Every structure is written in C-alpha cells, then in structure tokens.
Amino acid sequence: MATRYDLAWIFLRPWAIFVDRLPRLRALRMGTDGAKIRSALAIAFPDMNEKQRVRLMRANLRQRAYNVALTLLVTGLGPLAVWFARAIPIVDRELVSALLEGDRPLLLVSFHTGPIYLMLVAIWRGLAGRKVFVMHQDGGFLFREIERLLQRLGAESVPNTPMAVRGLIRHLRGNDRATVLFGCDYAPGTQIVSFMGRRFRAADGLRLMRDASGVDVICVVWERPGLFPRVRFVRPLATAGDSPEQAARVVQRAFDELAPIVAQAPHRWTAWETFVDRLL
C-alpha cells in the first residue's frame, strides 16, 4: 500500500472534520455509495484493514465534495477563472509540446482525480489556436454552469448523448487543430483491460474515436503531491505512427497510467463506486 499521509494530510484534518459533518456527505457515507467504495477498496487492496478502508472512503467522499466546490467556484468566477487557474503549476508539458503546438487534431484524456473543468482552464493557455470540444454529462445540477464556463472559454459544449461521438469524430476528421476532451466516460460498449490486478470492463469511447479518426492521444492528470495541486502531462498514449497493435492498446495504456496514481492516492480517484460492477 503506497498511499502517503504527509504534512498536507495533517494540515487538512480540521477542514476534513468539518466537511465530514455535512448532512449530504454523512448520508453518502452511511448509504450505498459508502458501502460500494469500501467493497471496491477491499478488492483492490486486500491487505488493507477495515479501519483503513473507512478512512479512505471518508476521504474519497470529501474529494468528491472538493471537486464539486471547485467546479462551482471556477464556473462562478467568470473571467477571473483564467487568472485563478494560472496559479496552478503545469509540469511535463515538454513531453507533448510538439503535439499541442502542431497542426494535427488531438484527443485529450483525463482521469477522475480532481476537478476536470478547473484543469481545463489551467491548460487553456497551452491550447491556443485550437478549437476545443468538451464532452460532459448531459444533466445534473452542474450542467448549466459547465456550459457557461465552456462558452466563456470559447469551447464547444458536447453533452454526452448517443450521437455525441459521431459529431466529435466528424470534427476530428474535418478540423486540422480540433481537440476533444472527455469530461465524462462515453460507453457505447466496453473493452476488457487489466486494472489494479483485475480484469476490468472499461468504456470504449476512447478506442472508438481513436480508431475512427487516427488522431494523437495524450493524457493529462490533476494531482496533489503536496499541499497544493498541479496538472501533469503524460507521454502520448497513441500517435499517428503507431502500428495497428499499438493503436489498439490505447485504452489499456490509459489504465496503465492510472493504476500507479490510484495505488499511491486511492482517496483521490472518485470512480470507486463503479469499480465492483465493472469487474469480470
């Protein structure tokens, strides 16, 4: 178990105790969500004891609340959102700078380890000159706020509907510098991958779009190695020069990048409640 409980964890404890008292989080903790998270942690980390699972479950629910709060903050700030996001460090951009600055379309993959839309604002300055399309949930109480934020940025809002991917594929084929970011999973079907030592059903929207367009795929991660967050770019997951076998492994490559992040800080991955249902 590689999870670190460093000074940042200690400094945030008073805030965590306060957030734990919120009625909504208490209901989630005592209900189905909390049970699903504990079950998932027991499978992914069999050496973890019950006290650790409960501790991480509580931290995971706080992380979800933190992501929602930051999304509400950034969508409410208007033009100040970009200024605010500039304070977030971006590392390892040189790994993908040629692709970001090139003329080819891109698929940008992110994981559920932080506030995706704040991350988008943070990397916006690195996407200058590109037409950006963001697939996001097609409902919920954040729906209108997300649409307004994307409108302010000049990005295209693409609600996750059955026809969304077809439209995005057309944009990737027809616009030399189109960039697509997934703000949520798209799963017309599933693909079997290895994840956390288990066979796992992953959404195959990434594979579908990559196969249909042949575009380059890069990954960007929100993480907090200390007290403050940062955005980190990962090596390309797929490029135009890949062989058919390499291109077919793009979803597995994404989960290969996600696994050590989850192992190191499992409380920050906010998709545990679906983990058990997606196991084979």
Image (cartoon, grey):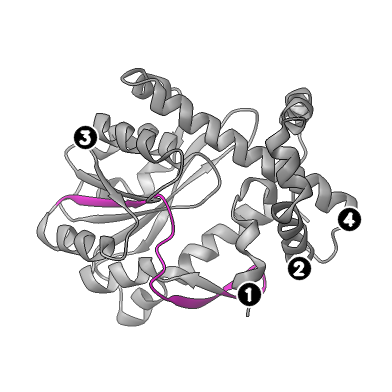
Q: Residues within 10 Å of mark 3 (few under 14, many from 20)?
A: few
Residue underneath mark 1: 279
Labels 1 and 3: the sequence-earlier one: 3
The residue under the point 54% across, 74% down is 201
Residue 229 percent coordinates (x, y): 55, 32
Front residue (pair 142, 135): 142
Q: Is residue 119 magenta?
A: no
Q: Is residue 199 magenta?
A: yes
Query: Which span of residues is magenta-colored?
Result: 177-200
Labels 2 and 4: the sequence-earlier one: 2
Q: Secondary structure at mark 3?
A: loop
What amino acid type is highlighted by mark number 3? Gly
What amino acid type is highlighted by mark number 1? Leu
Labels 4 and 3: the sequence-earlier one: 4
Q: Residues within 10 Å of mark 1 (few under 14, many from 20)?
A: some
Q: For residue 50, which numbered disc appears in the image?
A: 4
Q: For residue 43, which numbered disc appears in the image?
A: 2
Q: Secondary structure at mark 2?
A: helix
What amino acid type is highlighted by mark number 2? Ile
Q: Residues within 10 Å of mark 4 (few under 14, many from 20)?
A: few
Q: CA distance from mark 1 to mark 3?
A: 39 Å
- Quarter location, residue 152: top left
